[in-house]
Image (cartoon, rainbow, N blue to C red):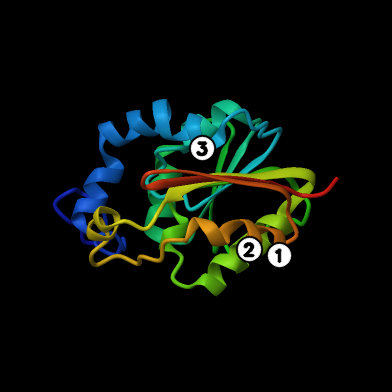
Amino acid sequence: MHSTDWLGYPKSMSMNLLHKWCCRSAGWSVFSRRVLLPWALGDADLGRSTVEIGPGFGANTDYLNERAGSVTAVEIDPDYADHLRKRFASTGGVRVIEGDGTDTGLASRGFSSVVSMAMLHHVPTPALQDALFAEAFRVLEPGGVFVGGDGSPTLPFAAMHIGDTYNPMPPATLPDRLSEAGFTDVSVDTTPGALRFSARVPS
């Protein structure tokens, strides 16, 4: 039995209390569904099978399940993964596995899309972020898409992550990093404090 914090979540979860409160709040869920996800994903066709890397509390998983035939949520933290399994136990189309986004163990070329939302800044080093991009490329079928969004480096974003892993990506470097992983049709857009990206595996 895990000990819990005052929010009722296992203390082993790596986010600070402010971050936990924000990410599990109804306000964040509404903002993600109505603003963040539509902006980040745009008109991307997620196809028959999506891999969601780093679902966290699962704020985006339901939305992805509505847009794709099925969702495989890959979560590295065993407590998060357990929480997600319980949350989506009665939801068709969602499979939760405990795994590392840099080495998922999923089949090569087995998925039509990979989505990463608001988690790449939690990957502790640029080398591991690049390994995650390479893993996304590996599991995608020809023509598959890698899409997502994240925060850009700002003081408020950094302040929210005190006590967390915090490694934001400079948007200017992302196109070359995705191209080096093998992707084509790379696009990166920014707004103040946020970025979105899309890339494709050659057909």
**Amino acid on which the number 1 mark rests in the picture:** Glu
Q: In terms of depth relative to the viewer, which is nearer, 30 or 36?
A: 36
Residue located 78% across and 52% down the image:
109
Assign a secondary structure to mark 3. helix
Q: Residue at x 71, y 33 (%)?
A: 48
Sequence-wise, the earlier of marks 1 and 3 is 3
Residue drawn at 79 percent across, 47 percent down: 141
Are the two marked residues, 1 and 2, in contact with CB atoms closer than 8 angstroms? yes
The Cα atoms of the two marked residues, 1 and 2, are separated by 5 Å
- Marking on residue 147: none
In the displayed structure, would residue 135 be above or below residue 187?
below
Decide if residue 141 is in sight here: yes
- Asked whether, in this view, residue 80 is left or right of residue 61, the answer is left
Determine which of the numbered discs, if any, sits on residue 40 in the image.
3
The residue carrying mark 2 is: 177
Q: What residue type is labelled 2?
A: Arg
Q: Is residue 34 left or right of residue 154?
A: right
Q: In which quarter of the image is the C terminus?
A: top right
**Which of the pair 66/90 is nearer the observer?**
66
- Label 3 to label 2, Cα distance in Å? 19 Å
Residue 71 coordinates in the image, percent (x, y): 59, 39
What percent of the width, then of the height, locates residue 119? 44, 54
Identify the element where label 1 is drawn.
helix
User: Do residues under tags 1 and 3 come within 8 Å of each other at their CB atoms?
Assistant: no
Residues tagged 3 and 2 counted as in contact (Cβ below 8 A): no
Q: Is residue 131 left or right of residue 158?
A: right
Residue topped by disc 1: 180
Residue 3 against residue 19 in the figure, above or below: below
